[in-house]
Image (cartoon, rainbow, N blue to C red):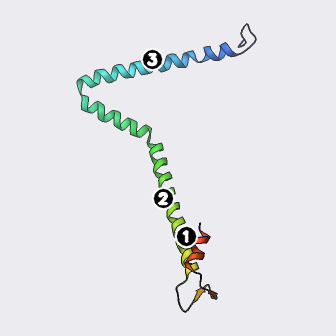
């Protein structure tokens, strides 16, 4: 039944989308008509309600974007802290040329060694 005279589904795919297209055009036309009539009666309320409707419809994307930015900032701060800690461990606290790192004594690294490690 869905096959056309060329034994393909191409024209069925096109004709199956026509009702959805008509529904979209009808809905948008009705919405524009109602918005234009209500805008003539009370413009401020229409603008405010459209703004709130837009925010509510896109709230999940706003929250996702805020979470994404927050995670990236937090990850960047963690990376900077880890790098600073590693550099601090390499440079040492300059206590007599020895650095105490987790109970063992190691030789103190020079500034050049720390820079070479992270380049």
- Badge nearest the viewer, 1 or 3: 1
Total residue callouts: 3
In percent of the image, x 55 and y 83: which residue is there? 92
Q: Mark 2 points at which residue?
A: 73
In percent of the image, x 44 and y 43: which residue is there? 59
Label 3, label 2: how far apart the Cα atoms are: 45 Å
In percent of the image, x 44 and y 21: which residue is there? 27
Label 3's element?
helix
Q: Which of 8 and 2 is in front in this view?
A: 8
* Dot placed on the residue nearer the N-terminal end, 2 or 1: 2
Q: Position of residue 69 (x, y in %)?
A: 48, 53
Q: Which of 109 and 92 is in front in this view?
A: 109
Label 2's element?
helix
Label 2, label 1: how far apart the Cα atoms are: 15 Å
How crowded pointer 1 is (Cα within 10 Å; few <14, some 14-19, many 20+) is rated as few
- Badge nearest the viewer, 2 or 1: 1
Q: In which quarter of the image is residue 13?
A: top right
> In this picture, is 18 found above or below 119?
above
With 71 as the anchor, is 53 left or right in this view? left
Q: In which quarter of the image is residue 3?
A: top right
Q: Name the residue under label 1.
A: 83
Disc number placed over residue 26 in the picture, else none? 3
With 33 as the anchor, is 103 left or right in this view? right
Label 1's element?
helix
Q: Which residue lies furthest to the front in this view?
A: 112
Q: Please say if the residues under marks 3 and 2 sit with CB atoms less than 8 Å apart.
A: no
């Amino acid at each position: 039944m869905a096959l056309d005279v060329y034994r393909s589904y191409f024209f069925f795919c096109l004709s199956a989308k026509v009702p959805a297209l008509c529904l979209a055009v009808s809905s948008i036309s009705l919405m524009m008509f109602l918005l234009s009539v209500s805008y003539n009666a009370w413009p401020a309320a229409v603008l405010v309600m459209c703004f709130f409707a837009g925010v509510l419809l896109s709230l999940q994307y706003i929250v996702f974007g805020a979470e994404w930015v927050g995670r990236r900032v937090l990850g960047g701060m963690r990376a900077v802290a880890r790098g600073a800690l590693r550099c601090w461990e390499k440079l040492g606290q300059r206590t007599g040329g020895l650095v105490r790192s987790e109970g063992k004594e190691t030789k103190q690294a020079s500034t050049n060694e720390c820079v070479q490690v992270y380049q």
